[in-house]
Image (cartoon, rainbow, N blue to C red):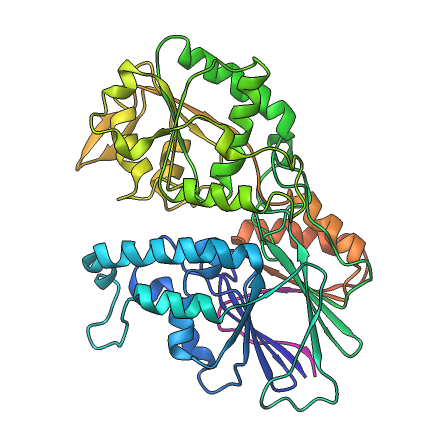
Amino acid sequence: MIQLLPLGGADEVGASCFYLNIDGTGIILDSGIHPQKKGLDSLPSFEFIEELPVDFVFISHAHQDHIGSLPFLIKKFPHLIIYTTIQTKEIAELTLHNAANILSESTTLWNEGINKNSNFIPYSHEEIDLLISSIRTVEYNEPVDIEGIRHSGSSKIKVEFYDAGHILGSAGILITYGNVKIFYTGDINLSKQKIMDGADLPEDNINILLTETTYGDTDSKMLSNWQNEQKRFAKEANKILNKGGSILIPVFALGKTQEILAAIHSLVAKGSLTDTIIYTGGLGNQISRVYDKNKYIVKRQNKNFEFSEIEQTDLYSVNELNLFNKKSGIVLASSGMMIKGTKSFELMKYWIKQQDFAIFIVGYMDPETPGYRILNLNKGDKIFLNDKDEIIRCEVKRFYFPSHSKREEIVDIVKKLKPEKVVLIHGEEKAKNWVGQQILSLGNNTKLYSAQKGKLIRLQT
């Protein structure tokens, strides 16, 4: 018996969490948080599995929408055994402590989404230390055997991690039980980025595929290859820098910061981009050091490159924002979606008033975020901020440096692995619809499911 119960991230990008029951062994794939929701609403629906066997949790990577609720999950199920890659564990130690700081500083914000009668309690740094120390690490392509307390099958379950090509330490997860193979993509990217070298897939056919669909609604003609997009980036950046303006790039501290920073460094070294001040700081810099530490351990494009080679100015030491007028440069600031209260949001409020400045959007934007609103506006348009309409006086440019697979690549995964059943996850309705229609058009008699939170899918009886 194999059943799948989505607890979050089924039809949206956020709070990814999927429960598998394999003959009485309970496996949780990822335990994320939703960045746009507050309190209990931001967490997966753990209440769905309170009466079910829960034994193991496998974390695909360290982005908050895949790992952010892990401390809450462990509070609820303290006996859970956690597995992930060595690199994800190292990064998680940084990101979860950072999240704990945000929680302690933003109690009021979280309480807006909490029922006063609930037992929701933000976690402490001591709890993070205990959680991190309990995580078991696995190498890519080195299977581990597991078996839950109430396992009723005659054979153990084998779990193996494959490099997902998304960020450092990211993994697709292959679960083998008898003759049944289940592959969970996590966030996967088959294409090369500036640092990451593209995903690995299982060699053999599988039976069940759980696949992300993030870019299912994005026309891949817009997703130019990295080399071409870097040239366009340099051309537009030079226009701003050469007239004394500064560029704000909202980025995720993990993954996008490192990829864009490496691209900028490469462009300057080649003489394609004006040599300028690069402002970075905070969590992104700490994570870059983890990238440097692991450069010879993981698959990546240039193992000799280190972020420590790049001269960077601490963004958090800038006290007067008019410094960016006097000493123009490129600013990499989180969050990547310019969520209210973050550094990129605060800078954005100043940036839009500057005639010679620009905001460069380089990553995915949730439709509910300020970043998405900015993305869909142009110079001269108005945006409602600070309880009034503000005119956008700076340039707004969109660049595509995807860390997820293009939608055709998701279909290519289906073609390669030839699954009998496909479950579409981690995408909005339009994205899942496009991918689903393409899979059905292959004519392979594939059984297709669109995951919904709380709706049980019986994959094998």
The residue closer to the viewer here, 395 or 143, is 143
The residue closer to the viewer here, 32 or 155, is 155
What residue do we see at 53% from left, 25% from top? Answer: 265
Q: Specify whether residue 206 is painted magenta.
A: no
- Residue 175: % across, % down: 69, 70
Q: Specify whether residue 460 is painted magenta.
A: yes
- Residue 142: % across, % down: 71, 64
What residue do we see at 37% from left, 42% from top? Answer: 335
* Left or right relative to 292: residue 247: left
* Left or right relative to 13: residue 96: left
What residue do we see at 66% from left, 60% from top? Answer: 139
- Residue 112: % across, % down: 22, 61
Find the magenta span and give its range: 449-461
For this orientation, the residue located farthest to the top is 243
Quadrant for residue 239, please give it. top left
- Residue 168: % across, % down: 57, 48
